[in-house]
Amino acid sequence: VVCANAGSFKGNIRGWGGNYFRDLVGSDDELRNWILAGEIPRLRDNPIAAYFIHRQRLYMPAYRDFIGDADLNALMRYVRWINSGTWQKQPLDLGK
């Protein structure tokens, strides 16, 4: 799913899958930060990336006050599973 986001680098918001996501999120720590704080420090602190981040109309909301550790870990597993591209062939393990 691609939605318009005026001012952003590519002018849109991409889904959690594919190369676009892998270019944005380099590690589980970055994914965790993006979900909890609504930003990735590596991008926030880069002058070129920050230029586009501040221009975009829609931002990733911060979920720090709304999600516990177990749900955060399950969400991260889900995002990684979707991004793996093999989700149609393997079961989803959200952990316990």
Image (cartoon, rainbow, N blue to C red):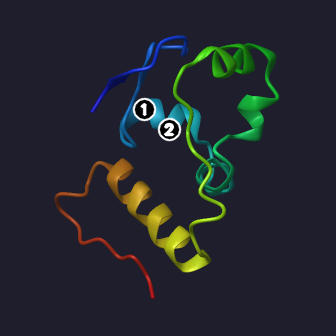
Q: Are marks 1 and 2 in contact (CB under 8 Å)?
A: yes
Label 1 crowd bin: few (<14), some (14–19), many (20+), radius 10 Å = few
Type of amino acid at the residue the image marks with label 2: Arg
Give above or below for 82 relative to 39.
below
**Coordinates of residue 24 in the picture (x, y in percent):** 57, 34
Quadrant where the image shows the N terminus: top left
Query: From mark 1 to mark 2, how far is it between C-alphas?
Result: 5 Å
Q: Residue at x 45, y 88 (%)?
A: 96
* Element carrying mark 2: helix
Q: Is residue 3 left or right of residue 36?
A: left
Q: Residue at x 36, y 37 (%)?
A: 15
Give above or below for 84 relative to 58.
below
Give the camera-side residue of 43 and 83: 43
**Coordinates of residue 38 in the picture (x, y in percent):** 63, 44
Badge 1 is on which residue?
A: 19
On residue 36, the disc is none
Badge 2 is on which residue?
A: 22
* Element carrying mark 1: helix
Q: Is residue 29 left or right of residue 2?
A: right
Identity of the residue furthest to the bottom in this view: 96
Give the camera-side residue of 65 and 31: 65
Q: Is residue 62 left or right of residue 18?
A: right
**Coordinates of residue 31 in the picture (x, y in percent):** 59, 51
Q: Is residue 14 left or right of residue 72?
A: left
Label 2 crowd bin: few (<14), some (14–19), many (20+), radius 10 Å = some
**Coordinates of residue 3 in the picture (x, y in percent):** 33, 25
Type of amino acid at the residue the image marks with label 1: Asn
Instruction: Identify the image quadrant of residue 11.
Output: top left
Q: Residue at x 37, y 48 (%)?
A: 83
Q: Residue at x 58, y 66 (%)?
A: 66
Total labels drawn: 2
Instruction: Identify the image quadrant of residue 50.
Output: top right
